[in-house]
Image (tube, helix red, strand yellow):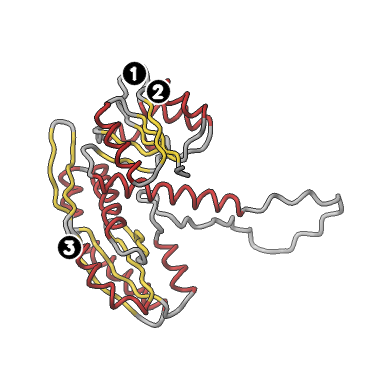
Amino acid sequence: MPDTDILVVEDDPSIATVLTEILTAKDYGVRHASNPTEALAAVDSAMPDLILMDVNLSADIDGIETAKQIKAKGEVPVCFVTAYSDDATIARAEETEPAAYLVKPFELGDVIAMVRISLANARRRKAQLAAVPPPAPPAAARPAPPAPAASPARPGRKEPTEDALTGLPNRHSIQTRVEGEPGAYCATVLTMDHSQILRQRFGGAALDQILFSFSQHLAQNLPENCQLCRWDGPVFIVLLDTASARDLQREIARVASSALLYHLQLPGRSALLRITAQVQFFSDTEPETLIGKIDKHAQGFHQVRR
């Protein structure tokens, strides 16, 4: 019996069937709801591990409002799968803090990559919450010691380790790992081509959709022992242990040059885009040098395109 329960909320029977077949073929358990009422009833019956939610449900409320009502019942990752990619719809969807946003028509690989990444991120967040120790009981009342004379304390802030758009490990995560094991890693920098042109032609929200789909394309096709991260903007990092780097570099280059054909749909127009990436390899025995090389390369990329 599958140990992962996915709820598909979709009012188009053909799309619901395709999604169900794709997911069950990968041994996921799938339930289907065709409208908000069925979706809310399904959640009340058993909270799923992941929800794939259409936006236009041909009902009194749409998928975004349905997601808000579901999240009021309990925490669950929601991935929107929709033909709508206008700024207003994406802005509304962002309010629900979705795990992903996939634009129809989609490729089979896009769905599987989105589901895998979303479930992995959900498991990681759950593990992090479980690892937080409970608050200590209050100590017995006693006179407080005099406060030391010092400059005002600056509130501590825990750095996030995940990229907000893609769910991948972010720059801070990479730097922490590399500095924790000096000389153990090298890096391949993948920079998505034509990002500035895409932003100027289609807008920032469309570029974010493309970057998200490109991250899924990379995650699905890179070798399993590659650690994919997002550094900044269109720059992605594949972190490799030094011992296996030489054997994997050619395969990484092949994946980066293998185009993602992305069907971008906007109000009143659409475009079929061929998305590829530039590749640069870096290695060093000193962590500061490796991080510095990556950062210099990324900054140079941004400066050239301004």
Callout 2 touching callout 1 (CB < 8 Å): yes
What element does badge 3 sit on?
Answer: helix
The image position of residue 181, as x and y in percent, is 47, 76
Distance from disc 2 to disc 3, alpha carbons, whole Å, reads 42 Å
What element does badge 1 sit on?
Answer: loop
Is 154 in front, or is 288?
A: 288
Callout 2 touching callout 3 (CB < 8 Å): no
Which image quarter: residue 237? Answer: bottom left
The image position of residue 266, as x and y in percent, is 18, 35
Instruction: Return the residue found at the far front.
Output: 1
Amino acid at circle 2? Pro
Residue receiving disc 3: 257
Q: Earlier in the sequence, mark 2 or mark 1?
A: 2
Residue under the image location 51 percent in, 50 percent down: 125
Residue under the image location 28 percent in, 67 percent down: 189
The image position of residue 124, as x and y in percent, is 49, 53
Amino acid at circle 1? Ala
Amino acid at circle 3? Ser
Which image quarter: residue 146? Answer: bottom right
Residue receiving disc 2: 36
Distance from disc 1 to disc 3, alpha carbons, whole Å, reads 43 Å
Callout 1 touching callout 3 (CB < 8 Å): no
Residue under the image location 33 percent in, 69 percent down: 295
Distance from disc 2 to disc 1, alpha carbons, whole Å, reads 7 Å
